[in-house]
Amino acid sequence: MIRPGRALAAVIALGLAVSCRPPGVPTVPPPSPPSATTGSSATTGLSDPHAPYDYVGRIGMVVAAHPLAAKAGLDMLKRGGNAVDAAVATAFALNAAEPFASGIGGGGFMLIYRARDRKVTVVNFREKAPAAATPAMFAGLGKAQSEWRLEKGTAVGVPGMLAGWNYALGKYGTKTLAEAAARAIEIAERGFPVSATFSQINKDEYEKLVKNAGEATCYLNGGIPFEPGETFRNPELAATLRRIAAGGIDEFYGGDIARKIVAAVRAKGGGLTLEDLAAYRAVEVEPLRGTYKGADIYTIPPPGTGGLHLLQLLSIAEGWPLKDWGHNSPAAIHHLGEAMRFVFADKERYDADPDFAVLPLVRLLSKDHAREIREKISAVQAAGTYATGPADPVQDRKENTTHVGVIDRDGNIVALTQSINEFFGTGIVPEGTGFLLNDHMADFSTDPKSPNAPNPGRRPVSNMAPVILFKDGTPFLSLGSPGGSRIFPSLAQIVLNVLEFGMSLDAAIEAPRFYTDSADGKARPISVETRIPGAVLQKLEALGNRIALKEAYDKYFGGAQGIMVLQGGKILLGGADSRRDGVGAGY
Amino acid sequence: MRISRWIVLSLMISAALLSAQGAVPMFEPPLLITSAGQSADVSLASTLARKAELAATLAKTATGQDLAGYKTLVLVLGASMKGLGAAGIDTGKEKDRVRGLLAEAKSRNIPVLCLHLGGEQRRGELTDDMIREFLPSAKMAIVVASGDKDGLFARICREKSIVLKTVDKTLDAVEPLRAAFRK
């Protein structure tokens, strides 16, 4: 079931249309007729790639930011793999098909729901700072600071991706790493036509790629960016994945690939060592839990603090009559915007790796704290100041990262968010390996006194927030998004669009978004997609808000993917964000 | 006399047609390449100039003073909030810089060549503002075709008698770029 009007999706449409119907399984019905909330593109706007469209399945569903990756996950489900197997197959495939957003040179978080014992757990494979890291490593660099944080060898954190996928497969999956990597190897070898999204991002990051990967890199086409429709191949990545498939992750963390990573990082001024790579371990941790009007919400804990702040924001919103105010009404945007600013004040003050700092999680997650913030918010005037203590201003302006959602025939669910940070990461490619190294050290503070300052072995704070919602103890909605600091505000809007405004999943994802935050205790403008009417913006300005216009569908606000479970699991809806190349694949 | 008038007229028409097709060199190196909007396309323009074997200098935030010694100003039209952020300037300052640069180029009789390499994805409110304001200062424009699906470049070039060359792909811009310069 493919969203009409998407060229790339159409490439695999025939394959899915056939393969989605295994023997003996009821045929998936066509999408429901359009309604006021779904606006299904089945009959409205076949040429509009943004028209809301819910992918439908009855047995399993995969949502991802590239159709080849979604298909890799779907095929894994149909071969008997469970949700974890399919999530890892999809994640591997994204390294080949959406290499600018994630890959084995990065890290992430996997939120897993195991249906048989109703267990929710988290695999944390966020990158770590190498032993050479120091709290002041990014301080006092002046204009060069950005380059050292984002594009030099010092920007590279110890990659956790393979360790995390391998841990999840070993404990919760049924397939081998080689089986999960197989489709990615095919994609990397055969290539695929690049999308307009790929092309634009490739052009945006051209300078970095030339500087760090060189004009001969596979990430450029004859030394210049790929145009839409041109074929991207990555045989060196295929060879790297083949070695890992044959030899396991020790090939990456201790073998020849490790030596190439270290050489590449050190050649660009970093201090990563073979010992740093050998010492890396993914860890399993308890999820955070919160509620919204009776719905249970599970998400990842810090250092993935996007989940924490999503729960905070929803708890604040819980006390407002949003439905009465109306979707994206001046009152709703003003109140939620103010709530975002107060939550960012908490974020600036407290966010850190919990292995090295004490975070007041109980207080931050409490309904009392939400009420206190709610009481500070005026209906007629923006507060203007939001500081709650020593601040570490949010520096993130990124659009990167990627999210995968999977549900299998047994009702197991995976919400996986992973990244190499900035698009194309550092742009550094270890020689002959075909994969990009992350620049997640940039997620540490530049302030040596910050609880999020770089230190050996410490994980930088992340905005990621994969989430699973339950109603009456039953999974209802799985969700996640890229988008840096916009992740939790965007996810909160999607959740509210579903729970308060009754939208179908993809209508909730495609609906116009807004975002604001505070820095150093001061309000920043409300960024809005231009689909929000001018009259609404005028009223927001009258309430003391500045407005910053973005595009009508702007990937600045992320690229969310989600799965909705209806009728006790008999109907699965997939929603995938048209702000990037998101698609669903169900059967 | 009548015959010679016809010959002169024919020559003028031929020259105009050749010029309109971009076959007659209109510019001289060296080039100063700068951005209007700070998108990464300006770096791409520098690569294209190198492939066209043109002596060029890339100065993303060039000002009028930087024009000394150059015979052509290449203005790469394409706005990027990321690029503006990296350069530490806002849209107002960027527009002021480009206005000043174009005024100085005019006073020095340095012709302007506009490039739009980002295609459809690079278009947007801010880029369009810059196209409308700065393109009329150009003598010629080379545009990746997907960036002119709505005909904005074609319309402005037609109204302002600017030579317009459209190319299918970015790399295809090398040849018209090479042909536009007298070696």
Image (cartoon, helix red, strand yellow):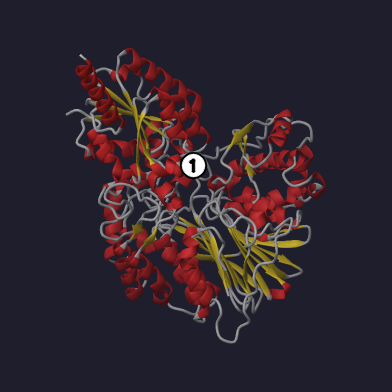
Residue at image mark 1: A445
Amino acid bearing label 1: Ser
Extreme-bottom residue of the structure: A24
Residue at image point 62% right, 49% down? A490
Q: Identify which residue, A237 or B12, lies in the foreground.
A: B12
Q: Position of residue A585 (x, y in %)?
A: 55, 69
Tell me the chain of label 1: A
Residue A479 appears in the figure:
yes
Quadrant housing residue A373: top right
Q: Identify which residue, B71 or A320, lies in the foreground.
A: B71
Q: Position of residue A201 (x, y in %)?
A: 42, 48
Residue at image point 59% right, 36% down? A549
Element assignment for label 1? loop
Above or below — where is A187 with respect to A170? above
Above or below — where is A491 with respect to A113? above
Q: Position of residue A556 (x, y in %)?
A: 54, 45
Q: Identify which residue, A576 or B164, lies in the foreground.
A: B164
Residue at image point 76% right, 54% down? A500
Q: Position of residue A37 (x, y in %)?
A: 72, 56
Above or below — where is A273 with respect to B140? below
Quadrant occupied by the C terminus of chain A: bottom right
Quadrant occupied by the N terminus of chain A: bottom right
Quadrant housing residue A127: bottom left
Left or right of B89: which side holds A258? left
Extreme-left residue of the structure: B183
Residue A172 appears in the figure:
no
Q: Identify which residue, A369 or A46, lies in the foreground.
A: A46
Extreme-front residue of the structure: B2
